Image: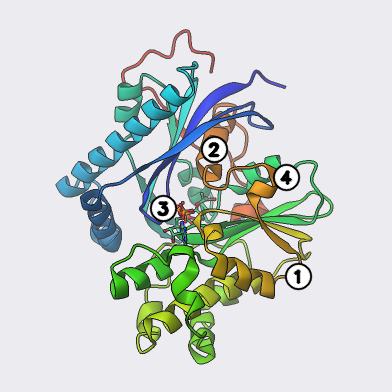
Amino acid sequence: MRTPLTAIGLMSGTSLDGVDAALITTDGIRVFHHGPSLTVPYDAPLRARLRDILDHAGSLSPDDADLLDAEQALTDVHTQAVQAVRAKAGNTPVDVIGLHGQTILHAPGRTWQIGNASRLSATTDLPVIHDFRTADVQAGGEGAPLAPLYHAALLHGHATPAAVLNIGGVANLTLMTKSGDVLACDTGPGNALLDDWMFRHTGQPCDFSGTCAAQGTVDMDCLSTLLAHDFFHKPPPKSLDRLSFHQALEQISTLSVQDGAATLTAFTAAAIASTPLPEQPLHWFVCGGGRHNPTLMHMLAERLSGTVQPVETLGWDGDALEAECFGFLAVRSLRGRPLSLPATTGVPCPMPGGRLTCGGISPAGRRL
Ligand SMILES: Nc1ncnc2c1ncn2[C@@H]1O[C@H](COP(=O)(O)OP(=O)(O)OP(=O)(O)O)[C@@H](O)[C@H]1O
Ligand SMILES: CC(=O)N[C@H]1[C@@H]2OC[C@@H](O2)[C@@H](O)[C@@H]1O[C@H](C)C(=O)O
């Protein structure tokens, strides 16, 4: 075992709701301590700017002035998150930051996360590992999902086959088989389509507690149309962009707000349940914001053969898991360990990744 390091992981997810930060102590194989975590929400103007960038990322140049300005604002929220976690942890020494950044585009052969590692390093006086996905994509992988090796580290010693299911803006799963193999993929939409539907029809950011969907009826014809998307004909490993299902809201546009919410919730659940897996999990452990939606959790339990429970039943924090993951991956990156495997991203061989940036700080004397 190599010396454990203390890392702060930072994740700005596809829901664009804010940056999650979490502190962990790990050697990149096992996790020795889960420290505090928190979310710093984006204010409405930053959220709107990020949404606009995401909608136009395909035509943006990396030196676009508005893009760089938004990136700076985004980075400064990340700095606040690091300072807040450090304060919450009693200013315990931290070795490294893992900065995922905000994905603004994800397509075959190209993945783009914004967030200025050099500025973050300078403002926090810490080394930063960032750009986690590029090496995988350049080697021919999907570049996502990257959480599986973290999920597998946490599942170590638990009954298998078991799955960890993250329902964020997009949903992704990790299966650990009976023999301990790890395989993974994005499964389809998570909450993002439902969020967009609710915002369009009610001005609310999401279907709080699934109450709107619970009042509606799933339109089976619309659901079949949604499930006919090409993505569901591809075998895993596979990954998605937040906008991959952008036509869905038009495809259900004639439905009432309640029936639309019910149909989109069923779409997320049915997409997960239809993912082809070599073994059916005995247990599904759910993390990400979707586990706060009882209508979605109920629809999942109806469609899956194993038990469906939030990851809190294992003592994990389902709102901090992705941020923790990028602290874990930062330590793996420093140690040259793979971040992805052929069965998690389709990369031809186990692939290290991430880049170290020390923006003006001296790495001397740091125990990396
Ligand atoms: N109380 C709640 N009731 C219903 N839905 C909720 C609730 N709390 C959170 N959510 C849903 O969870 C979403 C946020 O989930 P999460 O923070 O896991 O996403 P993310 O990390 O941004 O996404 P990704 O994992 O795709 O990067 C919200 O946008 C909302 O749809
Ligand atoms: C390209 C990108 O940012 N993908 C995210 C997104 O959000 C969920 C799902 O789609 C997953 O593939 C990934 O995030 C997690 C942290 C991952 O890489 O495992």
User: Is residue 17 found left or right of 152 in the rendered image?
Assistant: left
Kindly state the secondary structure of the residue where label 1 is placed: loop
Front tag of 2 and 3: 2
Q: Is residue 134 visible?
A: yes
User: Is residue 81 found left or right of 43 in the rendered image?
Assistant: right
The residues bearing labels 4 and 1 have C-alpha atoms spaced at a distance of 19 Å
Q: Relative to 265, is 310 above or below?
A: above
Q: Which badge, 2 or 3, comes first in the chain's sequence?
A: 3
The residues bearing labels 4 and 3 have C-alpha atoms spaced at a distance of 28 Å
Q: Which badge, 4 or 2, comes first in the chain's sequence?
A: 4
Q: Amino acid at mark 2?
A: Glu
The residues bearing labels 1 and 3 have C-alpha atoms spaced at a distance of 34 Å
Q: Amino acid at mark 1?
A: Ser
Residue to which mark 4 is pinned: 155
Q: Amino acid at mark 4?
A: Leu
Residue to which mark 1 is pinned: 305
Residue 332, image x and y in percent? 59, 32
Q: Outermost residue toward the top?
A: 365
> Do the CB atoms of the residues marked 2 and 1 lie less than 8 Å apart?
no
Mark 3 CB lies closer than 8 A to ligand 2: yes
Mark identifier at residue 111: 3
Residue to which mark 2 is pinned: 324
Q: Is disc 3 surrounded by few (<14), some (14 to 19) or many (20+) residues within 10 Å?
A: many
The residues bearing labels 4 and 2 have C-alpha atoms spaced at a distance of 14 Å
The quadrant of the picture occupied by the N terminus is top right
